[in-house]
Image: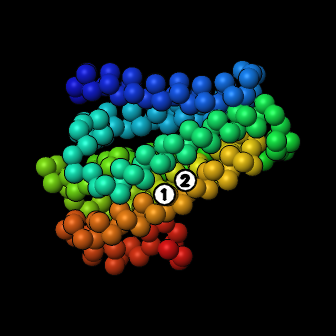
Amino acid sequence: MDTKLMVRYAIRETLGLLGMGVALFWPAGRLDWWPGWAALAVMAAWIAAMAITLIRLNPGLLAERLGPRKGAKPWDTVIMSLLGLIQLARYIIAGLDQRYDWTGGLPAAAQLAALALCVLGYALVVWATASNAFFSQIVRIQSERGHTVVRGGPYRYVRHPAYIGAILFELAVPVLLASWPALIISGLSVLLLILRTALEDRTLQVELIGYAGYARQVRYRLLPGIW
């Protein structure tokens, strides 16, 4: 494993975690806010789990995720940029909600259930990553890496399991943070993730050999029996 890649990954993810913390706690105007720390803890655990998964199972994927983003689809660049802005706005709004008490709080049981869903969602993303040596952060066919169709792990049940996990997190984290306005903003993220799922699936069916046959076997993109 390239040490420079590991350092770059650690720096990038640490800066992202610090940015999330600032977006939460600065608007909130306080540090004694357990849901904010819980959200950060879930994110930190996810980063650590992803690092272990990439280093132990798919070291080539770490280079892919950190390398130049050649071949990215223009629509994917737009969607991912919008997602980043919306997610940042969600944390800022949740922090302001905490400061000004717009929502008025939620039952602790609901927040704890949302915390469990956050963990479950990101656990599914890690499982999908561990099962897919081509789990890039951009939509592209990785011809230079011998890109093939992945059929194991959660891909036996739906074609895009990681998006289920991401959507679970997007819907659960505003409840954990006790903010209805943040949940509305997260709804925009969910719509973008569904759109990205559809566009990515269409791209794979056209450009990745064998994917059309896989799609006939595993019929559903996200929710079995629905879509």
Q: Amino acid at mark 2?
A: Ser
10 Å neighbourhood of mark 2: few (<14), some, or many (≥20)? many
- Residue 18 horizontal side relative to residue 210, left or right: right
Q: Residue furthest left?
A: 144
Marker disc for residue 86: none
* Whether residue 64 is visible: yes
Could you say whether the residue bearing mark 2 is in a helix, strand or loop? helix
Residue highlighted by disc 1: 193
Q: Nearer the viewer, residue 167 or 134?
A: 167
Residue highlighted by disc 2: 189
In the figure, residue 221 lies in which quadrant?
bottom left
Q: Amino acid at mark 1?
A: Leu
Give the image's coloring scheme. Answer: rainbow
Q: Residue at the location (78% across, 47% down)?
A: 110
Total count of labels: 2
Could you say whether the residue bearing mark 1 is in a helix, strand or loop? helix
10 Å neighbourhood of mark 1: few (<14), some, or many (≥20)? many
